[in-house]
């Protein structure tokens, strides 16, 4: 499975990224060492959207807090950057893809990242991964 993360990124050109206790959705909790991941610098924190692709070098599930009924699974990961994006892809480029049943990779990314604006790690389809590879 391939993954994508939308998070605060302090240095978009860094060779390594570390993300602690990140929320997961849409299969994101299954991320593991060796998985391919696409990194989006969150526009909510001033980022431009898609910035890099990489390989997960470590992934550790965070234990749920006792006594809390509903908790989103969280993981901490590190990523080794493989490539920098050479074209823009973010909220403004994906916003028009909102027919949730059209089976387009752009719509899948818009749905998973921007329908709820929270930062998160998500699992993505092979079709979405192939689409994202076109930005490198």
Image (spheres, helix red, strand yellow):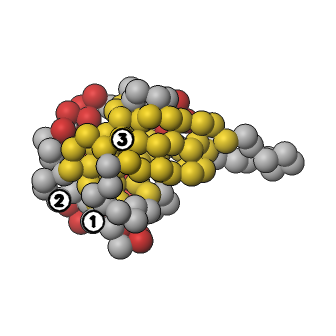
User: Would residue 54 appear left or right of 19 to someone viewing this image?
Assistant: left
Percent position (x, y) of residue 59? 53, 35
Residue 88 shows which numbered tag?
2
Residue 136 shows which numbered tag?
none
- The residue beneath circle 1 is 48
Q: Nearer the viewer, mark 3 or mark 2?
A: 3
Distance from Cα at disc 3 to Cα at disc 2: 21 Å
Whichever of callouts 2 and 1 sits on the residue coming sooner in the sequence is 1
Distance from Cα at disc 2 to Cα at disc 1: 7 Å
Which quadrant does the C terminus fall into? top left
At 35% from the left and 73% from the top, the residue drawn is 46
Percent position (x, y) of residue 24? 54, 44
Disc 2 secondary structure class: loop
User: Would residue 133 appear left or right of 77 to someone viewing this image?
Assistant: left
Distance from Cα at disc 1 to Cα at disc 3: 20 Å
Crowdedness of circle 3 by 10 Å Cα count: few (<14), some, many (20+)?
many
Whichever of callouts 3 and 2 sits on the residue coming sooner in the sequence is 3
- The residue beneath circle 3 is 80
């Amino acid at each position: 499975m391939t993954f994508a993360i939308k998070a605060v990124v302090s240095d978009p050109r860094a060779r390594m990224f570390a993300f602690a206790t990140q929320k997961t959705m849409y299969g994101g909790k299954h991320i593991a060492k060796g998985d391919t991941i696409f990194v989006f610098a969150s526009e909510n924190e001033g980022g431009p959207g898609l910035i890099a692709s990489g390989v997960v070098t470590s992934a550790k599930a965070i234990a749920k807090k006792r006594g809390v009924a509903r908790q989103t699974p969280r993981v901490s990961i590190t990523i080794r950057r493989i490539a920098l994006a050479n074209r823009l892809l973010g909220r403004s480029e994906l916003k028009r893809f909102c027919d949730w049943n059209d089976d387009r990779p752009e719509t899948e990314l818009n749905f998973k990242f921007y329908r709820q604006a929270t930062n998160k790690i998500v699992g993505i389809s092979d079709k979405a991964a192939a689409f994202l590879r076109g930005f490198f």
